[in-house]
Image (cartoon, rainbow, N blue to C red):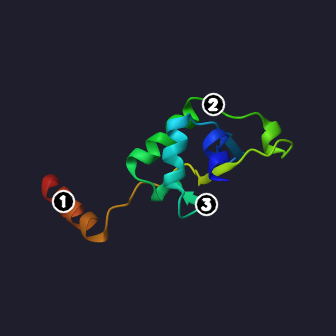
Amino acid sequence: MWIEKLAAGVVQVQTPIGPRYVMPSFVQRVYLLWMFRNFPILPHAVLSVWQQRLIDRLCSEQRFVSMAYADGMDEVPVIGTIEHRPPIAADRLPPRRPAASESAQGLAAEVRQRS
């Protein structure tokens, strides 16, 4: 099994639109086999910065394997799965209103200026 993964393994990347299969180079497959040695599925967040860059680079190079592999027509060994989710954007909050003490100080300063 290790030899098959080393020879022609792919990495499955879970995306919001479904799984994608990336074909790494031989050297990348060696490193990825070591990276997935204990766990078949890893969240993107637990990877080191270098590992995250490697996965991001593989995805950005558009070296995706055809959908025939995704349908299971050809059984290609999967080295491992990355749960690649985009960062959650913080909801846009309305502008913060000043606290009561701040508004009272502002009112006092405004009254002093008018006097």
Kind of residue at disc 3: Pro
N-term mark: 3 or 2 = 3
Instruction: Write down the residue under mark 3.
Output: 40
Residue count near mark 2 (Cα–Cα under 10 Å), binned few <14, some 14–19, many ≥20: some
* Image location (x, y in percent) of residue 94: 47, 55
Residue lying farthest to the bottom in this orientation: 101
Of discs 2 and 1, which sits in the foreground? 2
Residue lying farthest to the right in this orientation: 73
Whether residue 15 is visible, yes or no, is: no
Q: Quadrant of residue 7?
A: top right
Q: Which mark is residue 111?
A: 1
The residue closer to the viewer here, 8 or 44, is 8
What residue is shown at x 68% (from left), y 49% (from top)?
Answer: 78
Residue count near mark 1 (Cα–Cα under 10 Å), binned few <14, some 14–19, many ≥20: few
What residue is shown at x 31% (from left), y 67% (from top)?
Answer: 99
Q: Secondary structure at mark 3?
A: loop
Whether residue 33 is visible, yes or no, is: yes
Task: Determine whether, in the image, residue 20 is placed left or right of residue 113.
Answer: right
Task: Determine whether, in the image, residue 54 is placed left or right of residue 7.
Answer: left
Q: CA distance from mark 1 to mark 3?
A: 68 Å
Q: Vertically, is 90 above or below 105?
A: above
Q: CA distance from mark 2 to mark 1?
A: 68 Å
What residue is shown at x 49% (from left), y 54% (from top)?
Answer: 35
Of discs 3 and 2, which sits in the foreground? 3
N-term mark: 2 or 1 = 2
Q: Vertically, is 53 above or below 46?
A: above
Task: Determine whether, in the image, residue 52 is placed left or right of residue 70.
Answer: left
Of discs 1 and 3, which sits in the foreground? 3
The residue closer to the viewer here, 48 or 35, is 35
Instruction: Write down the residue under mark 2.
Output: 63
* Image location (x, y in percent) of residue 65: 71, 35
